[in-house]
Amino acid sequence: MNNIKEIKEFAYQNQVPIIQEEGLMFLKQKFKEYGCQSFLEIGTAIAHTAIEIASMDETIKVVTIERDPVMIHEAKKNIREMGLEDQITLIEGDALEVMIKGTFDCIFIDAAKAQYTRFFNKYSPLLNEHGIIITDNMNFHGLVEHPERTQNRNTKRLVRKIKEYHDFLESLEDFHVEFYDIGDGIALARRK
């Protein structure tokens, strides 16, 4: 795979969840708008988002965390084939256990949905003063708004966790949070 189109194709064919196109456009737009130069991603998958962000400008530094060995293998291959090893650092391990040094202009949460609140609490201290934290899948295919549409117990529990994270974000005193009905639902948090 040596281009982004092939990476997307691979994602669709192998049911790898990647950010929806509108969500990606929003993320890139906000990244530019806030003058971001560094990006921390929680949940690499096959490095689609990391590559999209790094490709915006060669000065952008990306750190991305992934724990699934199959995804790590695919992500490393994609990063190498896109020639972005100097810009993208892939951290292998559980995002709740690994230690990350440095601070970031943009933190993107897109990993285990049930852990969103814990990810936010762990990584928000690494946010630069004027930085932003963006979370994907806030609507989770419309199920957060309409949990009655699923009978699956695990899905119901996941949807409840996302709803709890939504409420957690709304209750933050030191962050201004906006919710957008873009892609699969996006939350943007920035320090007050």
Image (cartoon, rainbow, N blue to C red):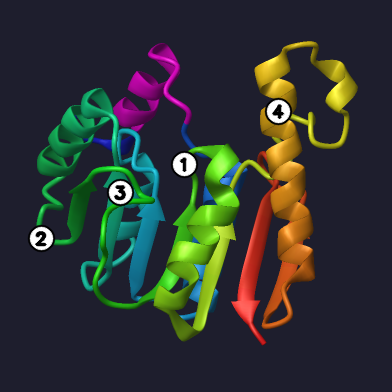
Disc 3 residue crowd, few under 14, some 14–19, many 20+, Cα 10 Å: many
| Rendered position, 96 above or below 12 | below
Q: Please report whichever mark, 2 or 1, sits nearer to the chain's N-terminal start.
A: 2
Q: Which residue is mark 4?
A: 157
- Distance from disc 2 to disc 1, alpha carbons, whole Å, reads 24 Å
For the stretch drawn in magenta, the main secondary structure is helix
Q: Report which quarter residue 122 is drawn in.
A: bottom left
Q: Which mark is residue 86?
A: 2
Q: Does the magenta portion include 192?
A: no
Camera-near label (3 vs 2) is 3
Q: Report which quarter residue 149 is drawn in.
A: top right
Q: Please report whichever mark, 3 or 1, sits nearer to the chain's N-terminal start.
A: 3
Is 22 on the left or on the right of 168, as rendered?
A: left
Chain part drawn in magenta: 5-17
Q: Residue at x 53, y 61 (%)?
A: 120
Q: Is residue 29 visible?
A: no
Q: Please report whichever mark, 4 or 3, sits nearer to the chain's N-terminal start.
A: 3
Q: Which residue is mark 1?
A: 111
- Distance from disc 3 to disc 2, alpha carbons, whole Å, reads 16 Å
Q: Residue at x 20, y 49 (%)?
A: 90
Q: Please state which amino acid type lies under the numbered disc 2.
A: Asp
| Rendered position, 154 above or below 190 | above
Q: Which mark is residue 65?
A: 3
Q: Please report whichever mark, 4 or 1, sits nearer to the chain's N-terminal start.
A: 1
x, y percent for residue 70: 23, 23
x, y percent for residue 144: 80, 36
Q: Please state which amino acid type lies under the numbered disc 4.
A: Arg
Q: Is residue 108 visible?
A: yes
x, y percent for residue 83: 11, 48
